[in-house]
């Protein structure tokens, strides 16, 4: 299966090489380091706290096996089990809390050799991020869907989404994270098979993939809308992102502190052997000037 990669390999044409200005990598990284130290670049934590109260996706009864709740167990804390140190052991799923979906997470992405957390290209994990603010619409309608047309309108105002970039949907859904039932917002009707939370339409995801994005992120429990099981195809964010060897981010936080454009998002999963995803510490670098 061939990947639609947002990264283009190979040498530049000779004409382009002649016109490419030279730069000193040491100066570029040195400038970044200086700006971080003097506060010209702020680090925003886009991660929710991971613990026993972290909301976990609940699948329809009888549909499939669920991920267990997060557990944190003490090994020692300056006591007889370890007099000089404190540490814990954990029980958690790969897709718990603020987490990363690797392509192998979904049936459509199962055949990529680099589709696991231990084989993916780490060069793709740090990239510019486009933040599409839908918070007002989502406050009025928890089933709000972001369309391709709305993304194009956003681009007309803020600039085009580039190849290899992240796109995240700001919904301020993280304000619900302290109350699991509000965060999941499941439909009380037993005949329904989803929840009420915002997300992208199929057309939206297809449009973003046509731009060559590296991945899509949400502040909700998953990358799809709550009722996306009823879409055609079901769960288009999962289905199409991972079909194209792209990444998903879920349960992001503090997107209200990011500009529409201009920030860099770092979303690195644990290097789990044949991992389908993992909890992450998502960080954004935001210029303060």
Image (cartoon, rainbow, N blue to C red):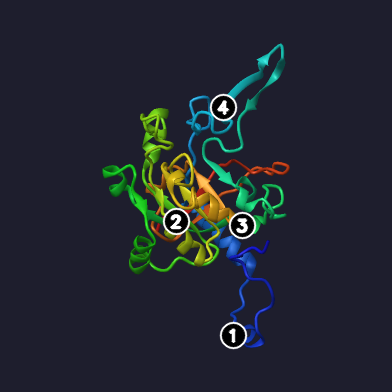
Tell me where residue 115 appears, x and y as whole percent.
67, 52
Where does label 1 land, which residue? 19
Mark in front: 1 vs 2: 2
Residues at discs 4 and 2 in contact (Cβ within 8 Å): no
| Circles 1 and 3: CB atoms closer than 8 Å | no
Residue 167 shown left or right of residue 124 in the figure: left
In percent of width and height, residue 208 lies at 47, 62
Whether the residues at callouts 3 and 4 have beta carbons within 8 Å, the answer is no
Which residue in the structure is indicated by mark 4? Answer: 70
> Label 3 to label 4, Cα distance in Å?
28 Å
In the rendering, which numbered label is found on residue 245?
3
Alpha carbon of mark 4 to alpha carbon of mark 2: how far?
31 Å
Mark 2, residues whose alpha carbon is within 10 Å: few (<14), some, or many (≥20)?
Answer: many
Point out the tag, 2 or 3, that comes first from the N-terminus: 2
Dot 1 alpha-carbon crowd within 10 angstroms: few under 14, some 14 to 19, many 20 or more: few
**Disc sitting over residue 202 in the figure:** 2
Q: Kindly identify which numbered label has been placed on residue 257.
A: none
Q: In this view, does 178 lie above or below 262?
A: above
Between 195 and 77, which is closer to the camera in this rendering? Answer: 195
């Amino acid at each position: 299966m061939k990947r639609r990669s947002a990264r283009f390999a190979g040498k530049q044409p000779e004409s382009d090489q002649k016109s490419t200005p030279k730069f000193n990598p040491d100066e570029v990284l040195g400038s970044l380091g200086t700006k971080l130290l003097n506060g010209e670049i702020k680090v925003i934590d886009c991660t929710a706290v991971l613990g026993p109260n972290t909301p976990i996706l609940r699948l329809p009864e009888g549909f499939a096996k669920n991920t267990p709740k997060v557990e944190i167990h003490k090994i020692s804390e300056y006591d007889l089990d370890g007099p000089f140190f404190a540490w814990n052991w954990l029980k958690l799923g790969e897709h718990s809390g603020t987490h990363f979906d690797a392509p192998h997470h979904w049936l459509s992405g199962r055949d990529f050799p680099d589709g696991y957390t231990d084989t993916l290209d780490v060069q793709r994990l740090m990239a510019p991020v486009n933040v599409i603010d839908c918070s007002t619409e989502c406050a009025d309608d928890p089933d709000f869907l972001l369309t391709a047309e709305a993304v194009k309108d956003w681009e007309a105002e803020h600039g085009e989404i580039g190849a290899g970039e992240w796109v995240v949907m700001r919904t301020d859904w993280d304000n619900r994270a302290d109350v699991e039932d509000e965060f999941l917002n499941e439909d009380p009707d037993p005949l329904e098979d989803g929840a009420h939370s915002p997300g992208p339409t199929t057309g939206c995801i297809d449009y973003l993939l046509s731009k060559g994005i590296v991945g899509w992120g949400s502040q909700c429990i998953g990358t799809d809308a709550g009722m996306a099981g009823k879409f055609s195809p079901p769960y288009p964010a999962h289905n199409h992102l991972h079909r194209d060897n792209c990444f998903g981010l879920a349960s992001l936080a503090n997107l209200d502190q990011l500009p529409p454009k201009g920030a860099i998002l770092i979303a690195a999963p644990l290097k789990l052997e044949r991992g389908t995803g993992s909890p992450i510490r998502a960080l954004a670098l935001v210029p303060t000037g």
